[in-house]
Amino acid sequence: MALNKVVNGPEQAIEGIENDMHIMFGGFGLCGIPENSIAAIRDHGVKGLTCISNNAGVDGFGLGLLLETRQVKKMISSYVGENDEFERQMLSGELEVDLIPQGTLAERCRAAGAGIPAFFTPAGYGTEVAEGKEVREFNGKPHILEHAFGASFAFVKAQVGDTAGNLVFNATARNFNHAMAMAGRITVAEVEELVPVGELDPNSIHTPGIFVQRIYKGEVFEKRIEQRTVRKRD
Amino acid sequence: MALNKVVNGPEQAIEGIENDMHIMFGGFGLCGIPENSIAAIRDHGVKGLTCISNNAGVDGFGLGLLLETRQVKKMISSYVGENDEFERQMLSGELEVDLIPQGTLAERCRAAGAGIPAFFTPAGYGTEVAEGKEVREFNGKPHILEHAFGASFAFVKAQVGDTAGNLVFNATARNFNHAMAMAGRITVAEVEELVPVGELDPNSIHTPGIFVQRIYKGEVFEKRIEQRTVRKRD
Amino acid sequence: MALDKNGIAQRIAQELQDGFYVNLGIGIPTLVANFIPQGIEVEFQSENGMLGMGSFPMEGEEDANLINAGKQTITALPGAVFFDSSTSFAMIRGQHVDLTVLGAMEVSDQGDIANWKIPGRMVKGMGGAMDLVASAKNIIVAMMHTNKAGESKLLSKCSLPLTGVACVTRVVTNLAVLDITPQGFKLLERAPGVSVEDIQAATEGRLIIDGDVPEMTL
Amino acid sequence: MALDKNGIAQRIAQELQDGFYVNLGIGIPTLVANFIPQGIEVEFQSENGMLGMGSFPMEGEEDANLINAGKQTITALPGAVFFDSSTSFAMIRGQHVDLTVLGAMEVSDQGDIANWKIPGRMVKGMGGAMDLVASAKNIIVAMMHTNKAGESKLLSKCSLPLTGVACVTRVVTNLAVLDITPQGFKLLERAPGVSVEDIQAATEGRLIIDGDVPEMTL
């Protein structure tokens, strides 16, 4: 009775990707990023991508891989520190960058998936983010009008998924993966564990399978840590 | 380290309720309604309420109780069938009724909780729901501007909650309870089971406690079924 | 012979495609779930907050926490998911549902639909219908061709308050299958034994008859 | 004697109230968590998707799936909740967070703040800061009173691109505690051993000195 979304790996998962597409990538920093799909996109060689992602990876990992190969024309992000190659391309003008507030980024993704073409938010009022945007007061407070994002693909990563595309995330690796899964015209989920339908608790699924078009078990997850902060044992 | 939101029962939970307030009630039909809080509001006798709830209960149960006692001045709902007393009061003009599309109702609640004062939706365009509202085209399709709801209280019902107000719902009893919990200035949750913090899986909480100001274990849950439909056993 | 309600549902079930997510309204649409063609997998969305809706429960197994949008007790199939109302309408508004089937009091030949209010007589509310019709890509109306007074429900203009404008794609009645086109209702199929003239007589709105109109096969 | 970063954090911790949900920015604000007053319970929100953030993990127990907004490995306390980014900013935009503490490059005497961009030199992005400052009811800025070149960071007008306008409520620096008022920075407290004249010399924006200004107690 449940629909089967399983594809046999990242190559099949990215089928249909084309030059100049708008593409979303889940993750926050390197946490919860779709590692296997990113590697497949690098290997595919598609060019001119506009990438919507909270961050831009680091040198040699995450979206940093696609920056190295110059497959990215434009980044739409909220925070892009920690990446020398990114900074070089941006300052030299090779890479277009659109920086937007993190909450607006998340809400624009959700809105795209939820059929809300535009909404008002106070974030960014009075700053350069508001330039050229409609301003309106609600309850005496100025807000700006922000629009939903379009994206041909959304690549997300979950801990567990079932064959119908239902997803469960792990801790803060959830982050942008849910809202972007909602937003993608084709949403591709890579998971650490792929289970048959019926194994997940229907009350505890984070992203319903209706938002997911393709799913596969990632072969390897490096899950690199960006800032290893620990307490010493006594 | 976690905050304690526990109150000792429905009387304490509704403290601060006043005549003419706007109040939200979770539930869909009679499924997942805050039975104990509704009973306490009836016993309290507060008048002139504007109730925001998907439905209006049935005669003698759910919000039907507050209609019988004439405590409700106005209902804001999406569907109000199955209630004779409601129909009588509405047709006689004793009760104001504002009917709005179910998805718009849910989104206006979420928007209130999410600091989004207004958003565009296609629902209701070209109907009487759109009268007096701003219309704007996005992608060639007309949409209407809808505003977030304000509510002094939101009463919700969950299956399990912890002392910090974290909530877990059961099956389709989740419905409007989550978005309304987000929206209430004071959100009151009644639960079938109240547990200490740390007992709920942090990955499987539906409504984070930050949205809940008061929580208590309901004494009795009748959980009446509106339409008992079954298959006969062979 | 005109179809009964089950016949209408059976004909609509032929519109199901493998992999569809489907929202069925109250009444005749609900019956569509009984006629899923063999070899096809679809999943039912219930706007009160679930995907993977199954049949009614066995006697004694009904659960007050598990109902459909018609407030009937139901069951969940393997792979089911529960979610909140704002997420449910995100699915609907965001066009993630492939097919919506709902009943109507009136449909116009421009695809307008009225199904929530009879001024002065009945106002139960639109429920989720306005969200569904405003957003769905693919809306089939399931209804009788005429009302109890024998008047056509396929009109040049709806007389009742609208639920949505220019949104219906297809209408399946006890007499016919019709598509909404810029020229009006295009007659696609006749119910078994029903003549084009019967359908013409029962249709107040513009009716396009283009060549031979085949009978439905059920 | 001017405060060090820990001293600033310690002073800000006095602003915590029992039951507060608190969002701490990167840098000095993070240190506030080390000085929670006795008898007070607060919960930390991390905008990448958690409530109930705890301290750094013990060596060897770090989890790549569990980080804070500064991408540092952390732990979860009992009662913690994980959620997605859109829900996280619903909390922030919807004013469910009681106190926000963040760093700044500049603050103006009208409460404007700049902390995300130095044109031509550094553009890391605003992250969640613009959402936080646009919505929070209660925003404390934690920063040094002057920059590395010795120039005041408390200005009559910010020179850098703004993060938000008229939003800061209080500033705690190595020299002083100041509130934003319609008349400018109102000096509330001096760091131990720091004179009103020292603060005046380090403050470019309008400074209100009203009677005796007490020393902080830490």
Image (spheres, coloured by chain):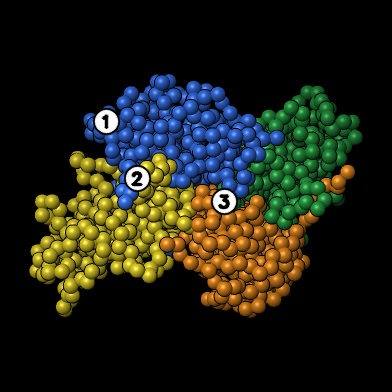
Chain colours: A orange, B blue, C yellow, D green
Subunit of mark 2? Answer: C
Taking the image as shown, residue B86 lies to the left or right of residue A70, namely left
| Residue occupied by mark 1 | B85
* Nearer to us in this view, C189 or C109: C189
Looking at the image, is mark 1 or mark 3 nearer the viewer? 1
* Residue C204 in view, yes or no: yes
Are circles 2 and 3 on residues that touch, CB within 8 Å?
no
What is the x, y in percent for residue A232?
86, 47
| Residue occupied by mark 2 | C59
**Identity of the residue drawn at 58% across and 63% down:** A194
Crowd tier of the residue under label 1, counting other residues whose Cα lies within 10 Å: few below 14, some 14–19, many 20 or above: some
* Nearer to us in this view, B20 or D199: B20
**Identity of the residue drawn at 45% across and 28% down:** B220
What is the x, y in percent for residue B208?
58, 41
Subunit of mark 3? Answer: D
Crowd tier of the residue under label 2, counting other residues whose Cα lies within 10 Å: few below 14, some 14–19, many 20 or above: few
Q: Which mark is residue D86?
A: 3
What is the x, y in percent for residue D37?
77, 30
SS label for mark 2: loop
State the separation of the CA atoms marked 2 and 3: 41 Å
Q: Which mark is residue A14?
A: none
SS label for mark 3: helix
What is the x, y in percent for residue D34?
79, 38
Q: Give, as a three-letter code, the residue at label 2.
A: Glu
